[in-house]
Amino acid sequence: MPKSVQIKTHLEPKGFLWFSPEYLSQKTLLVQILRKFRRMLFSVFHREYIAQSIAMNRQGECHRCGMCCKLINKCPFLGTDSQNLPFCRVYGELRPAACNNYPFDRVDSEIKQCGFKFK
Ligand code: SF4
Ligand code: SF4
């Protein structure tokens, strides 16, 4: 009899250092800073996890609110176009990987009005 194969349709968020996903989901400034480090380091060392998490768990789309460019501090590359919409002055190859994939999982997703949601 063939063994049943379980197909994974959901990926649980990873912690960071010794912090759990639950701890990293808090709204305090300290945890915001930890999330920023997590975002930067994951974009280099956990690219496969990021790709899987986006493919399996992320829904929705970016509606260009620009809020993710103002987390903790406003990014110096954030501009405003003629229609008063925010845009990235280094969009393309120079844009940091951490920005390209925002938000990559439920822990990373800290902006209520963001167009991306997670399962
Ligand atoms: S917060 Fe979300 S919707 Fe707003 S610009 Fe960033 S990715 Fe797009
Ligand atoms: S580099 Fe561009 S996408 Fe990244 S935070 Fe700055 S303005 Fe936003």
Image: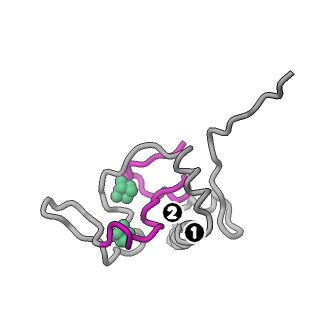
Q: Which quarter of the rendered picture does the C terminus lie within?
A: top right
Q: Nearer the viewer, residue 63 or 71?
A: 63
Question: For the residues carrying marks 1 and 2, which lies nearer the camera in this image?
Answer: 1
Rendered residue at 64%/58% (across/down): 21
Q: What residue would you read off at disc 2?
A: 27
Rendered residue at 63%/53% (across/down): 13
- Majority secondary structure of the magenta segment? loop
Q: Is residue 80 left or right of residue 72?
A: left
The three-letter code of the residue at mark 2 reads Lys
Query: Considering only vertical position in the picture, is 114 above or below 27?
Result: above
Q: Is residue 109 left or right of residue 83?
A: right
Range covered by the magenta-colored residues: 90-119
Q: Is residue 115 left or right of residue 35?
A: left
Rendered residue at 66%/61% (across/down): 15
Rendered residue at 51%/63% (across/down): 27
Mark number for residue 38?
1
Q: Nearer the viewer, residue 93 or 99?
A: 93
- Quadrant containing ligand 2 reads bottom left
SS of the residue under disc 2 = loop
Q: Tell me, yes or no, whether the two marked residues, 1 and 2, touch with CB atoms within 8 Å.
A: no
Q: Position of residue 87 (x, y in %)?
A: 26, 64
Q: Position of residue 19 (x, y in %)?
A: 68, 66
Mark number for residue 73?
none
CA gap, disc 1 and disc 2? 15 Å
SS of the residue under disc 1 = helix
